Image: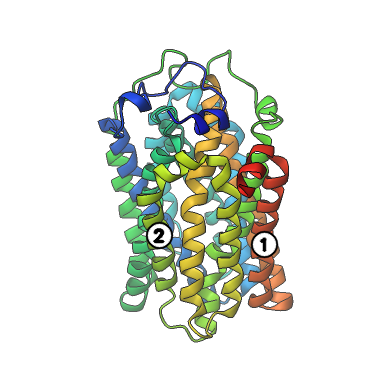
Amino acid sequence: MKAEVANALPEHPGGAPNGLDAPENPRLVFERAFWLVFAASFALNMAANLFVLFPLWVVELGGNASIIGAIIGTGSLAALAARPGVGALIDRRGRKWTALWFLVLDAIAISLYFPIHSIGLPIFLVRAIHGAIEGTARVALFAMVYEMLPRGREGEAMATFSLCGMVPGAIAPLVGEQLIRSLGFTVFFALAIALIVASAIVVSFVVEQPHPAHASGDSPGGRSYRSLLTDRALMPLWIVTLMFSLALASRLSFVAAYAYQEGVQRAGWYFAIYSLMAVGVRLVGGQVMDRMGLNRALAPSLAVLAIGLALLAGTGRFGLLDIAAVIGGIGHGYLYPALSALVIARTPLKSTGRSSSIYSSLYDLGGMAGPYLLGVVAVTFGYGPMFIVSGSIALAGAIYFVIAEPDARLRFRN
């Protein structure tokens, strides 16, 4: 284990979560369960990344930017509201059980979009159901990963695992866009259902190996939600996560609608380029993050993402949409695995379920507030200024982290 990383991260009580030790394992080797969770998450993320085109359906039904934001925000609000019960459910029934059955429910929830043909209460209700169920399944899958990462190699390991999110981000929007053009939204939703069902089938093959410290969830000796939220080591990460998710809401909610408005015929290429850049960074950058220190990687990555988001204001001009995709993908490619690995490294083993719930809830909170607030900005001032505001939120997060983390500030300047 590199001394710089050891100094940057607090020790994990109980040693390496999955028994791997960096010095004895120069090459990361994961067990079968890791790859099954990877595959299940890949299928779930394929379905989720189809939904970056969901705003086009809302526009087709007669919605504008504020309605798009309100509908998408409703799903995130429901996921956030359901989150307090997720940790207890995982504790009681286990990670695998929770992931499996909520994936089944997720497939049913998506089918509820079929009979909707106008903007009204039903679309908000279905989006709320979809958001709460998918959010629960996602937390359960992520909690399973907590147990599988090697101490001292968290950045490299998370860079590997996070490919199950970024590769679908490159593929799904292009596939979805072609399906919508050729066959319509009915087939679009049907594909999402099929992917969710595939994810559930894969999860059914996972054999959980309970950690002796806590079998299916957090043990009685684990930290409380309040204690984790106010923990001095974790709090800066919680704040950065919230700002990251708020900024990212603009990309997930409004790029497709804005691109079509500006005459860009293939908005899916933005998502493909963005994700491919993030994938490339993670394939070659995991070990780099561990060597330089995860703290040091966080703020510059967030600043680069900020530039990529702000450049979206120029969509339709001089190829700026593609340039924004390249820059944003690079920033995101380093940021998410570094942030996730830091959260995992600073979480006591007996508190992984609650920490995972908090971490996911912050994305839901940003996903709830971001689309609504940024949608209001877009309606009032236009999409361009809204993307500049989004980039400014990410930049503020980078500045905050440099100020809040002395180690990160010193390393950032070296």
Instruction: Tell me which corner region of the image, top left, top right, bottom left or bottom right, holds residue 150.
Output: top left
Q: Looking at this view, is 95 or 12 the one in front?
A: 12
Q: Residues within 10 Å of mark 1 (few under 14, many from 20)?
A: many
Relative to 283, residue 136 above or below:
above
Residue that label 1 marks = 372
x and y percentages locating residue 309 in the rendered image:
58, 66
Q: Residue placed at 57% from the left, 73% from the top?
A: 312
Would residue 78 be visible to someone looking at this image? no
Q: What amino acid is labelled 1 in the image?
A: Tyr
Q: Residues within 10 Å of mark 2 (few under 14, many from 20)?
A: many
Relative to 299, residue 147 above or below:
above
Residue that label 2 marks = 169
Local SS, label 1? helix
* Image quarter of the N terminus: top left
x and y percentages locating residue 140 in the rendered image:
45, 35
Relative to 37, residue 1 above or below:
above
x and y percentages locating residue 307 in the rendered image:
59, 66
Earlier in the chain: of badge 2 and badge 1, it is 2
Q: Residue placed at 64% from the left, 57% from the top?
A: 394
**92 sits left or right of 247 in the view:** left
Q: Looking at this view, is 118 or 215 the one in front?
A: 215
Q: Residue placed at 29% from the left, 26% from the top?
A: 207
Q: Residue placed at 61% from the left, 50% from the top?
A: 299
Local SS, label 2? helix
Q: What amino acid is labelled 2 in the image?
A: Gly
Instruction: Tell me which corner region of the image, top left, top right, bottom left or bottom right, holds residue 306.
Output: bottom right
